[in-house]
Image: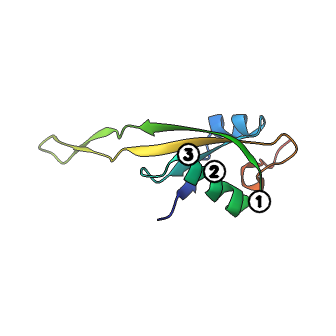
Amino acid sequence: MQTIIRPIISEKSLREAAFKKYTFEVNPQANKTEIKGAVERLFGVKVISVKTSIVPGKKYRMGKKRQWGQKSDRKKAIVAVKPDQKIELFESGSK
């Protein structure tokens, strides 16, 4: 099972990266311990805390007959690392 699916790069997540908090989309079945281990293995950092939340899927209209579809729910994790460490993936080019 792949625990971390992708990093979430948005204005809010980049703003939080300045405070050593990084956001990832994770497998919905993954728990906090698995997420912590995966981040420590992939990026070589020491994780202090993990906060998770379920983001409900959005509804969207498709076709001319006004049929509705719904995107699947996803799970997101906000990971805090030690103050002297960072994940290079979230560093922005401008300072």
Q: Is residue 86 left or right of residue 3?
A: right
Whole-number angstrom distance, CA of label 2 to CA of label 3: 6 Å
Q: Nearer the viewer, residue 32 or 65?
A: 32
Q: Residue 15, position in %: x, y?
A: 71, 34
Q: Earlier in the sequence, mark 1 or mark 2?
A: 2
> Given contact means CB atoms under 8 Å apart, are the residues at marks 1 and 3 in contact?
no
Residue type, label 1 = Gly
Name which residue type carries label 2: Lys
Classify residue 67 by image quadrant. Answer: top left
* Marks 2,3: beta carbons within 8 A: yes
Camera-side residue: 40 or 14?
40
Name the element at disc 1.
loop
Mark 3 closeness class: few <14, some 14–19, many ≥20 residues within 10 Å: some
| Image location (x, y in percent) of residue 94 | 82, 44
Q: Residue at x 78, y 37 (%)?
A: 18
Give the labeled residue for mark 2: 36
**Spot occupied by residue 85 in the image (x, y as percentages of width and height):** 84, 48
User: Would you say residue 7 is visible in this rendering?
Assistant: no
Can residue 34 be spotted in the picture?
yes
State the residue lying farthest toward the front. 33
Name which residue lies at 88% across and 44% down: 84
Residue 91, placed above or below residue 41: above
> How many marks can you see?
3
| Mark number displayed over residue 44 | 1
Amino acid carrying mark 3 in the image: Lys
Label 3, on which residue?
32
Instruction: Give coordinates of residue 92: x percent, y percent.
Output: 77, 47
Q: Which quadrant of the rendered structure holds the C terminus?
A: top right
Residue located 73% across and 40% down the image: 17
Q: Quadrant of residue 42?
A: bottom right
Which of marks 3 and 1 precedes in the sequence?
A: 3
